[in-house]
Image (cartoon, helix red, strand yellow):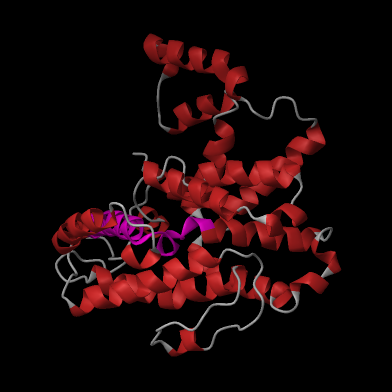
Amino acid sequence: MTTPEHIAQATACYLQQLSNRETKVMDRMDEATALIAAATHDIDHPGRSSAFLCNSDDRLALLYNDICVLESHHAATTFRLTMGKFWWMVARAANLNITNDIQTYQLMLSMFSADDKINIFKHLDRESYKLARSIIVDMILATEMTRHFEHLAKFVSVFGTDVDSKETTHDNDDNQILIRRMLIKCADVSNPTRPLKFCVEWARRIAEEYFTQTDEEKHRNLPIVMPMFDRTTCSISKSQIGFIEYIIHDMMDAWNSKLSTGSYTNQQCLNTINVPGFIEMPEIVRYMEHNYSKWKLFEEQGINTLSDIKRKQLTLNSEATGSSSIEEL
């Protein structure tokens, strides 16, 4: 099952975050490959986590040896779409007897004949293709959250001081990798930095996805990967507060201009990096702070379940009609 929102989310947010700062340090190849990575970073997502796939002995977990299962699948699928021979491998992996199934065989042939129309890399020379592929694969793999703090720490160690004085930013390959990784990571989990009605909508969708996974884990007697996402006990508002405090705040602090003083209660959030940011998009910081305060309010009001959130969305959509300021959204 493909989960379309996974694909659309980062694509839109990447376009939003293209600023003069990135443009100066990214060449055309960087920009093109980053767009492709953003558009495909969750392609063919099954709506379950890598840990779930490993625990359930899913074929993808077996194929990728329990290592970066989903991200490896997304990266492989991205390139598989442009190369017909891989469809044969997929069919074999799925135990399809193509030679005895004329309809499947004809379908495969039609895929092969159409490859040239969708192979967006066909005009690249070998070296350019290898470079494009390496960038796309690396960016997609960077969205794997078990290495989140490692990627963030590396980015801060390089760009956490006076960014403008870093002359190596433009031509240092290692720094380019850090920039691309941070860019797609910020785009991937950026819903807390969007207008409130969109922030709440994405929070509801991801909660429903996680709840469904927990339901299946219980039904199949599998380990519960995310016990906090039990639909009978989870507070969606509290989960979003924690998400902003422990993941989003520090990442956006490093990526964007210095955060203004917010109403964060977590000590980690109070200890901001307090340096010039990498880009200048103050609106995403304002949205984040506004959304954080709203989630705190929702928690106080007891707006926690999916039903609560859906009812609140009706009010938010009504209030947002004709609104132009962040405070009204």
- Image point (41%, 87%), residue name: 266
Residue 312 or residue 42, whichever sits in front = 312
| Magenta stretch, residue numbers | 187-214
Q: Along the line of sight, which residue is nearer the eye, 258 or 66?
A: 258
The residue located at (64%, 28%) in the rendering is: 120
Query: In the picture, residue 235 is in which quadrant?
Result: bottom left
Pinpoint residue 280: horizontal percent, then vertical percent.
62, 65
Please check the rendered image and state whether residue 197 is part of the magenta-colored stretch, yes or no.
yes
Q: Is residue 197 above or below residue 299?
A: above
For the point 75% across and 72% down, the residue is 163
- Where residue 178 appears, as percent x and y from the top left, is 68, 63
At 45% from the left edge and 27% from the top edge, which residue is drawn? 91
Location of residue 121 with respect to 311 vertically, above or below? above
Q: Main secondary structure of the magenta part?
A: helix
Residue 39: in magenta span:
no
Q: Classify residue 281 as left or right of residue 287.
A: right
